[in-house]
């Protein structure tokens, strides 16, 4: 049995030193020091000229993009609240007008008018909710687009930095 283990060990050593680049074994991947030389070589090949300045500039652009996205989101929220306020004022005015016109009329006519007004108000509320949801979605999409563009820019910058000469 000991001979079989020695033969397997020799076979493994011979196959790893044959010069072929094979996929790393599970043991190799679990040992971070094993590939330290390869990682060191790769890091030395990177062009890091002005790296600190580039890093600071990238951070500044990231913050600027987040501030811009936040501003777009805030403006969208303001638009939604403003539109919602207009909708509520309109509904209140409509109900006040209907209430003023009711006294002195036939009860059946008043009930029919209230019924119709209720149906219209319900339909308008559904339409208003859709409009508010679309406003909010558009606002968030605009804010997300700013962040998405910045992320893509960061990916492009890192890709350029990692390209070999």
Image: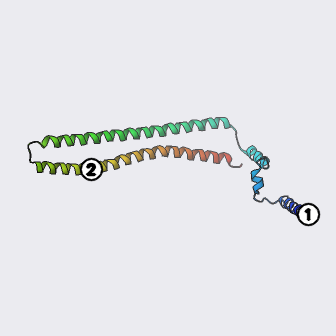
Cα gap from disc 1 to disc 2, whole angstroms? 86 Å
Please name whichever residue, 129 or 35, is drawn nearer the observer in this view of the structure.
129
Identify the residue position indicated by label 1 in the image: 3
Q: Position of residue 101 (x, y in %)?
A: 13, 42
Q: Are marks 1 and 2 in contact (CB under 8 Å)?
A: no
Is the residue marked by circle 2 packed among few (<14), some (14-19), or many (20+) residues within 10 Å?
few
32 left or right, relative to 65: right
Question: How many numbered circles are shown?
Answer: 2
Q: In the drawing, what numbered circle is on residue 106? A: none
Q: Answer with left or right where residue 6 lies relative to residue 94.
A: right
- Foreground pick, 155 / 99: 99
Residue sticking out furthest to the front: 1
Q: Position of residue 42 (x, y in %)?
A: 74, 47
Q: Secondary structure at mark 2?
A: helix
Q: Residue 147 in the image: x percent, y percent?
A: 52, 43
Asked whether 81 or 144 is in front, the reply is: 81
Instruction: Sort mark 1 into few (<14), some (14-19) or many (20+) by Cα contacts within 10 Å.
Output: few
Q: Is residue 73 left or right of residue 42?
A: left
In the rendered view, does 61 fall on the left or right side of 108? right
Q: Which residue is mark 2?
A: 122
* Image coordinates for residue 131, horizontal then vertical, percent: 34, 48
Q: Colour scheme of this structure image?
A: rainbow
Q: Residue at x 33, y 48 (%)?
A: 129
């Amino acid at each position: 049995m000991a001979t079989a283990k020695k033969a397997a060990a020799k076979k493994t050593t011979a196959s790893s030193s044959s010069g072929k680049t094979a996929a790393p074994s599970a043991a190799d991947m679990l040992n971070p020091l094993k590939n330290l030389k390869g990682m060191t070589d790769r890091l030395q090949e990177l062009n890091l000229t002005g790296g600190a300045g580039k890093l600071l500039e990238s951070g500044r652009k990231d913050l600027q993009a987040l501030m811009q996205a936040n501003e777009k989101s805030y403006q969208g929220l303001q638009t939604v609240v403003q539109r919602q306020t207009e909708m509520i004022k309109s509904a209140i005015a409509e109900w006040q007008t209907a209430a003023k016109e009711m006294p002195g009329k036939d009860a059946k006519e008043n009930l029919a008018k209230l019924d119709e007004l209720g149906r219209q108000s319900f339909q308008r509320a559904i339409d208003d909710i859709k409009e508010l949801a679309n406003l909010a979605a558009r606002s968030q999409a605009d804010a997300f687009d700013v962040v998405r563009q910045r992320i893509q820019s960061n990916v492009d910058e890192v890709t350029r930095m990692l390209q070999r000469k």
